Image: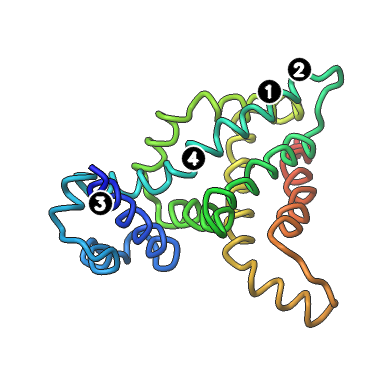
Amino acid sequence: MASRSDTKTRILDAAEKLFAERGFSETSLRLITSKAEVNLASVNYHFGSKKELIRAVLARYLDVFMPAASNQVNQLNTAPTKATLEEILSSLVDPLLDLNALRAGGTSIFLQLLGRGYIESQGHLRWFITTHYGQHLDAFIKAVSASAPHIPPAEMFWRLHFTLGTIVFTMASADALNDIAAAEFGEHNDIEAVIRKVIPYMAAGISVPVNS
């Protein structure tokens, strides 16, 4: 049993690294099996397909992040004063950073994987996330919508996707941006600083009134 568990973990670790570095489409099962030092039969036994493997890789993070993020949002919802949009977005920072306890660099890896799914149009991931974590997503969307009631639902849909695109691009370029900031402005930012920098920008973009 221990051997099977070790094999499954090796496959997940190898797939995670390759997916984050190369993307889902550019990572073949042959590459994964080579890196994990297992045969293709092992991947088929534990996961059945590449799509299921992709979902399993993300689930290791989502199973931790989504309930924690939902809990933070729910705490804001029960507070005596109405939460601002910036406070709602900021409530996700600690659950994101806690992913570093899951594995070294967990926050960055998770956001890279999300970005890959977003850029590569992995439709099955949207289905997987909405099916398995829908209640957590609903809690977040409801909180955001309540903080910006002047934004119609259809417009909010677009703005939340623009927001996701913003964080995906920022995290994909974080190393280069940090190097530029250090060289030109003497700034030295870690992952938390970068995330906190982008939150006011996203909050302003979500809540700006719609032109009539």
Residue 166 lies, in percent from the top left, at 63, 54
Q: Gap in Å between the C-alphas at discs 4 and 1? A: 17 Å
Q: Residues within 10 Å of mark 1 (few under 14, many from 20)?
A: some
Work out which quarter of the rendered image holds the N terminus and state it.
top left
For mark 1, what is the residue? 74
Mark toward the start of the polypeptide (3 vs 2)? 3
Amino acid at the residue labelled 3? Lys
For mark 3, what is the residue? 50
Q: Gap in Å between the C-alphas at discs 3 and 2? A: 41 Å
Look at 53% across and 48% down and name the residue there: 102
Q: Residues within 10 Å of mark 3 (few under 14, many from 20)?
A: some
For mark 2, what is the residue? 78
Mark toward the start of the polypeptide (2 vs 4)? 4
For mark 4, what is the residue? 62
Q: Is residue 97 above or below residue 182?
A: above
Q: Going by the image, does 177 lie left or right of 200? A: left
In the image shown, does 15 or 27 lie closer to the viewer? 15
